[in-house]
Amino acid sequence: TRKNRTIAPHATHRRTVINLLKERNLVDSRSRKKTPVNLMNGEKHEDPNDFLDRLIASVPGILAAMIVSTEGVPIASKPIVLMNQEHVPAMIAVMQSLGKKATLAWQAGDLEQVFVRGKNGYFVVKRWGSDMILAISATADMKIGYILDDLYA
């Protein structure tokens, strides 16, 4: 017989992230195979601000998120105040570039993400499409696996 069990809150949030990614065609719904998507592709275009709104609303613990070009040009940001700080998008692009160079130097394969853990939280930078970068800032108590394992672009 099956035991009645409650679903842990983090399991629910994990499913929310996976569903969000399925909508963006970032995860194959049958195999959960991760597939990169270029946001600027007209067929699969979604407003980056709308995506960031839904991401922050569906994953507790995310403090801020930003999409920038590989050159450090801001594309979208939540909260908007990040867009007004010129050094933030540039820092994100530099982190991505240094991570890529480090993985090449250490023969670690293609860069998947740059992960920084501080006393008060996390900062994750991931490639998004062919010419964009997604950066996420999260609280220290967040289940960071939601971002590290599920969000791919």
Image (cartoon, rainbow, N blue to C red):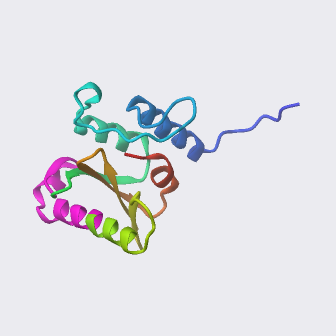
Percent position of residue 28, x then y: 50, 32
Residue 37 visible to an observer of this rendering: yes
x and y, in percent, of residue 4 in the image: 78, 34
Q: Position of residue 92 (x, y in %)?
A: 24, 62
Q: Residue at x 33, y 67 (%)?
A: 99
Q: Is 76 included in the stretch rendered in magenta?
A: yes
Could you say which quadrant of the image residue 46 lies in? top left
Chief secondary structure of the magenta portion: helix
Q: Is residue 104 above or below residue 2?
A: below
**153 with respect to 45 (left or right):** right
Instruction: Locate the C terminus by quadrant.
Output: top left
Nearer-the-camera pick, 129 or 2: 129
Residue 143 seen by the camera:
no
Q: Of all residues shown, which one is farthest toward the right?
A: 1
State whether residue 128 is above or below residue 85: above
Total number of numbered discs in the rendering? 0
Residue at the spot 40% in from the left edge and 59% down from the top edge: 110
- Residue at (50, 51) in percent of width and height: 149
Quarter holding residue 23: top left
- Horizontally, residue 59 falls left or right of residue 1, namely left
- Indicate yes or no whether the magenta region holds residue 103: no
Q: Nearer the viewer, residue 73 or 103?
A: 103
Quadrant the N terminus occupies? top right
The answer to whether residue 21 is left or right of residue 41 is right
Residue 104 screen position, x and y as percent:
37, 69
> Quick check: 64 above or below 105?
above
Q: Residue at x 23, y 48 (%)?
A: 131
Q: Give, as a single range, the part of the protein colored magenta.
A: 72-96
Q: Is residue 128 left or right of residue 148?
A: left
